[in-house]
Image: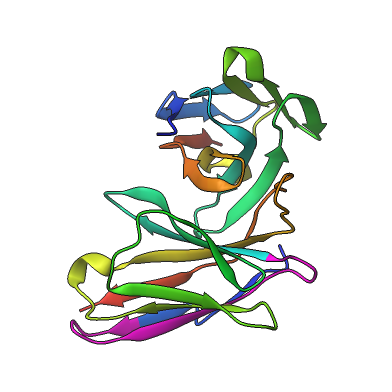
Amino acid sequence: GIQVEQSPPDLILQEGANSTLRCNFSDSVNNLQWFHQNPWGQLINLFYIPSGTKQNGRLSATTVATERYSLLYISSSQTTDSGVYFCAGDNYGQNFVFGPGTRLSVLP
Amino acid sequence: DSGVTQTPKHLITATGQRVTLRCSPRSGDLSVYWYQQSLDQGLQFLIQYYNGEERAKGNILERFSAQQFPDLHSELNLSSLELGDSALYFCASSVSSDSNPYEQYFGPGTRLTVT
């Protein structure tokens, strides 16, 4: 079956610091997405990134499909970035699988 | 706001009862997905519908069922509820087509508490 792994499981940063979150996935995964789950439980789309690089403000993501990993970069972190970051993917529309998440805490 | 709506936001019920969760997808989206997020199991895919038909099934219990109606809204029915069914239930939608799935947008979730 589809496998999605994330690292690190937990990350504590001081406000203003940069961070890199990693997602490894099995070769049957495509349609990779990154989500942020805020402390209120809401899942927010960050990137739809099956391959290549995208940027949105302080966040950017890169997926290297041939090597089966994706990276999420957060620069100049803010306390509002706190929460859990998930990557997820599916196999051509079948069985969307979430990774276990990286819990980020940004301290003021 | 993702454009996906879910009702109710919170639901408290007793063991053995049956509940129905409702989801309205984004305008134009044909696919609806249901997910369960519990503390011990993480986020798990339950079931997907595309234009009224079941497309994929994940870790959905036999006590749970879903359907998608002609207006594309979907309902998830949970019956014979157990304490372990307490969780956050998400609905997501996407445009989706047979050969080119699109990104999924998630609703705010329904928090179910079974007492």
* Residue B16 falls inside the magenta stretch: yes
Q: Position of residue A102 (x, y in %)?
A: 46, 33
Residue A103 in the magenta stretch? The answer is no
Q: Is residue A24 above or below residue A31?
A: above
Residue positioned 72% across, 48% down in the render: B102
Q: Nearer the viewer, residue B87 or A11?
A: B87
Q: How many marks?
A: 0
| Percent coordinates x, y for residue A89 in the rendering | 56, 38
Quarter placement of the C terminus of chain B = bottom left
Left or right of A82 on screen, residue A64: right
Which quadrant would the N terminus of chain B be assigned to in this image?
bottom right
Residue sitting at x 58%, y 69%? B53
Residue B1: tell me if it is visible.
Answer: no
Q: Residue at x 67, y 17 (%)?
A: A64
Q: Quadrant of residue A30?
A: top right
- Figure coloring: rainbow
Q: Which residues are magenta?
A: B12-30
Q: Is residue B46 above or below residue A100?
A: below
For residue A65, side relative to residue B40 (left or right): right
Observer-nearest residue: B26 or A86?
Answer: B26
Across and down, in percent, residue B94 comes to 69, 58
Vertical order, A52 against B33 (above or below): above
Give the residue displayed 54% in from the left and 47% down from the top: A94
**Left or right: A104, with B80 as reference point:** right
Instruction: Measuring from the top left, give residue A44's x and y in whole percent.
Output: 63, 52
Q: Nearer the viewer, residue B62 or B93?
A: B62
Image quarter of residue A74: top right
Q: Is residue A48 above or below residue B59?
A: above
- The answer to whether residue B105 is seen in the rendering is yes
